[in-house]
Image (cartoon, rainbow, N blue to C red):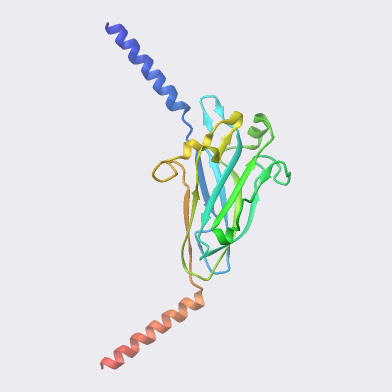
Amino acid sequence: MTRLLRALWLLSWILGLSSSALALPVTLTLVPSAGSLLPGQTLSVAVVVGGLTDMAGEIALESFDLDLSFDTTRLQFDSLSFATSLGDPNDGGETFVSGPGTPNVSGVVLMGEFSSLTGAQLLALQNAPFTLATIGFTALANPGPAEFEFINLDGSSLGGVEGRALGDELQDPNTGCAPPAVCALSVTIVPEPRGAALLAAALALLALRRRAARV
């Protein structure tokens, strides 16, 4: 009986180890070109994916379908460009960019791509972590934090070859994005130096007047 229990325990341990090793630590990260901006300055945000491996090795990413929300009161959407990690972005059969709506009205950048390349060809292009796309913005004259966040994440958000739903690894019923994925970002729009100096001078003058009035 003792040997049987030991054998069963060993088998369960092996199965548990295998299942944990098969789990995909997929990461979806937003990488900004700067943490703070003056009004009028430009910002680029790279969408980077990593951790696409399992016991068999690297997994090729075949498609993605992502919606990125941003603060339209502090940022103006300028551009969206795709990397070459899923093939040639200029090939009309490879990429699709826009869904319904306008980013500066909806506050959402829709981006997606489906590759017709083979798994071997994709792996040759994908040295994780790698960039999927880069979005360009211009800072507006409204100081404060500007938030970015992926929304509507599900299994089809990241697709591997042979229909593997890699996006499921990013799901979380509470936040929509589970660790180690970093699916939100905040940058800060700061006031123009001249405007900040004028504001400081005005406050100092107001303080002096109050003091004079008390005397």
Q: Nearer the viewer, residue 133 or 151?
A: 151
Residue ranking furthest to the front: 100
Q: Quadrant for the C terminus, please.
A: bottom left
Residue at the spot x=49%, y=36% of the render? 168
Q: Is residue 213 visible?
A: yes
- Among the 4 quarters of the image, the one containing residue 75: bottom right
Left or right: 190 in relation to 125: left
List x then y, in percent, for residue 158. Answer: 55, 39
**Image spot of residue 36 (x, y percent):** 50, 62
Residue under the image location 41 percent in, 46 percent down: 175
Is 114 situated left or right of 185 in this image?
right
Residue 43 visible, this angle: no
Q: Quadrant of the N terminus?
A: top left
Report x, y in % for residue 46: 57, 50
Q: Which residue is rendered at x = 47% and y = 40% of the image?
A: 170
**Which quadrant would residue 210 be assigned to in this image?**
bottom left
